[in-house]
Image (tube, rainbow, N blue to C red):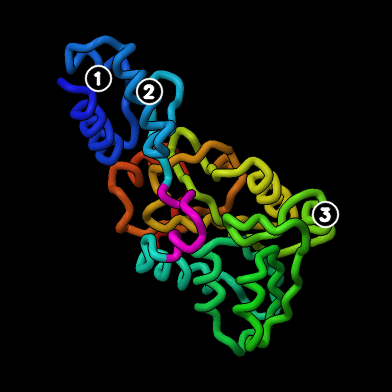
Amino acid sequence: MLAASRKDLLLARLRADGRVIAKELAAELGVSEDSIRRDLRELDAAGLAVRVYGGAVPASPAVADYATRQAVATESKQRIARFAASLIEPGSTVIVDGGTTALATVRALDPALACTIVTHSPTVAAALLDHAADVIIIGGRLFKHSAVASGAAAVEAARMVRADRFLLGVTGIHADAGLTTGDADEAAMKRVLAERAAETYVLGSEEKIGAVSPFAVLPFDEVTGVIVDPAAPATSLEALDRRGVPLLRVG
């Protein structure tokens, strides 16, 4: 089998199974493990897979630039957003992460809802200009990929916050790799924000389920629930169920 055909097969297996094991696939195809590992390295370099010990897992499409992500899984994001918005209660203080699903969440809020929204996302804050909600903006260096404040100043400001809930955005939700994102500083900021909230809920639109990004955010046992869309890959949802992840399925 030619290398190009092997890579197509690897990508198909990643989509179907959520993981490939180099040793097993080498035996199945009758090629060396080195050949499979080389294919996986090239897929990783192209941003199509993430190499892990023994094989690879799917790369998240949610690591694309902000403008591109606005057109990815839009219907799924809307369903997740409506569910997440229902978790924001009158009088509560809620931290809302950055990203396109978080933006859809505040757009789904009742404009008359009296609450406090804390965010490090200028786009999320701007979407609340005509709402009754009080808005507290955490400032810092602008990380343009996700349109959020980051860096030491943002972390320091976040440590002054106390909230009832945190609506956390990630780019990967995988049974083995956990909750991941594409930038180390952004992952650190998310951990700080989670520390400041009594409960953390993950916004899990379909393109994130079964996918992996390079940097770990939180283990599953440190979140209250992962809001997921039934449109996500069934094998990945089943793997999360087996792992004991607290899944909240949207209707």
**Mark 2 neighbour class, 10 Å CA radius: few under 14, some 14 to 19, many 20 or more:** many
Q: Which region of the structure is painted magenta?
A: 61-70
Q: Nearer the viewer, residue 124 or 177?
A: 124
Which disc is residue 83 wearing?
Answer: none
| Residue 82 part of the magenta segment | no
Q: Is residue 92 in sight in this rendering?
A: yes
Whether residue 251 is visible, yes or no, is no
Q: Is there CB contact under 8 Å for labels 1 and 2?
A: yes
Label 3: element kind: helix
Question: Where is residue 154 drawn, in percent x and y?
Answer: 78, 56
Q: How far, Cα to Cα, is label 3 from label 1?
A: 47 Å
Residue at image x 73%, y 80%? Answer: 134
What numbered label is drawn on residue 25?
Answer: 1
- Viewer-proximal residue among 203 and 73: 73
In percent of the image, x 30 and y 48: which residue is there? Answer: 233
Q: 211 or 93, which is in the foreground? A: 211
The quarter of the rendered structure image containing the C terminus is bottom left
Dot 3: within a 10 Å radius of its alpha carbon, few (fewer than 14), some, or many (20 or more) residues?
Answer: few
232 to the left or right of 156:
left
**Which residue is rendered at x = 65% and y = 60% of the image?**
148
- Looking at the rendered structure, the kind of residue marked 1 is Leu
Q: Read off the residue under disc 3.
A: 153
First in sequence: mark 3 or mark 2?
2
Q: Percent x, y for residue 100?
A: 51, 64
- Across and down, in percent, residue 66 comes to 51, 60
